[in-house]
Amino acid sequence: MDVRNVIILGAGPAGYTAALYTARAGLKPLLFAGPQKGGQLMWTTEVENFPGFPEGVMGPELMQKMQVQAEKFGAEVVEAIVEEVKLGAEPFTVKTANKEYKTKTLILATGATAKWLGIPGEQEYMGKGVSACATCDGFFFRDKHVVVIGGGDAALEEATFLTKFASKVTMLVRKDFFKGSKPMQDRANVNERIEILYNREAREVLGDGQKMTGLKIVSNQTQEELELKADGVFVAIGHKPNTDLFVDQLDLAKGYLSTEPGTPKTSVEGVFAAGDVADWMYRQAITAAGSGCQAALEAERWLSHKE
């Protein structure tokens, strides 16, 4: 069986950037696209904060361009799902449903998945008013009314950030208190643009077929239902890093892959992490791409050292 120099798991900004750099280094990387080719940007309409696109670029188009660029230099992209990874011995083993691969180094860029509510209309209006990233999409809601769902630090931070653009931010909190830190709560409580509705839950995203127009919400104490008009909703109930394949094989922190500070090195030598699977703080396309570059450079150095 041929032993690959580099195998990359994940086809988001981190994975494609790692593929580009390792391909240009002559390492002939093999990239597994996985179940969501293109990552979370496939749910994003227009990306305006990725350098080099002053007019903006559609998320799927940006991912397609990254793939084409990586393949131009010799990266091989396989649209298959990896079912098992074995890191106990070198070379490492990667298994799909019908094939097994060996590799000297592994770059893990499997990303993270936003937690969604699972209510009617949520998927239908994804990218048409429904979002899970205020930093990515807040600009599109200038002078609009938006809703933030959640009661932790992430929700409080998103709500505060959105007041830079939105005319009004309504927070739906499932309990009668916030779970977030007191400084974050204090900041939200004194912000005149933020309205807080406790003991409220969203039951349905409403829309006109083209875009979201509001939410159907309910009081979980009185069961009273009402329709809340809004131009957008930001679901801020957390993210789940896609690390199931690596549990009990690599060190984790808060569910994310642990890396050596300032590097993409994981707890197993020759295995590197890039993008949202190891980043619980920033979760941006540009930071993911940067970490993909770092992982590729470290993989190249690792191979040179071993040889």
Image (spheres, grey):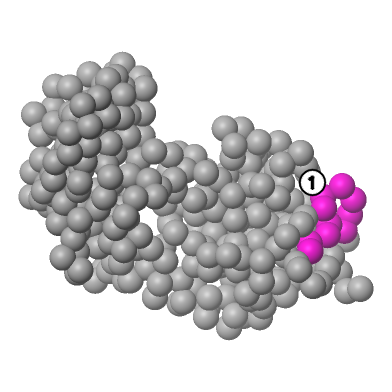
Image x and y of residue 8, in percent: 67, 63
- In the rendered view, tell whether residue 12 sits above or below residue 130: below
User: What is the residue that sits farthest to the top in this orientation?
Assistant: 182
Image x and y of residue 232, in percent: 20, 52
> In the figure, residue 73 lies in which quadrant?
bottom right
Image x and y of residue 69, in percent: 52, 78
Please tell me which residue is depicted at 32% across the width and 34% down the height of the picture. Answer: 150
> In the figure, residue 217 lies in which quadrant?
top left
Query: Does residue 104 belong to the magenta stretch?
Result: no
Residue 70 in view in this figure: yes
Residue 138 in view in this figure: no
Q: Nearer the viewer, residue 176 or 184?
A: 176
Query: Does residue 93 belong to the magenta stretch?
Result: yes
User: What is the residue that sits farthest to the bottom in this orientation?
Assistant: 72
> In the figure, residue 206 lies in which quadrant?
bottom left
Specify the amino acid type for callout 1: Glu
In the rendered image, the quadrant that contains the N terminus is: bottom right
- In the rendered view, tell whether residue 202 sits above or below residue 100: above
Please tell me which residue is depicted at 37% across the width and 68% down the height of the picture. Answer: 59
Please tell me which residue is depicted at 53% across the width and 65% down the height of the picture. Answer: 36
Q: Mark 1 sits on what residue?
A: 269
Asked if residue 216 lies left or right of residue 80, the reply is left
Where are the magenta residues, as a range? 86-95
- In the rendered view, tell whether residue 195 sits above or below residue 10: above
Asked if residue 307 lies left or right of residue 237, the reply is right
User: What is the residue that sits farthest to the front in this orientation?
Assistant: 223
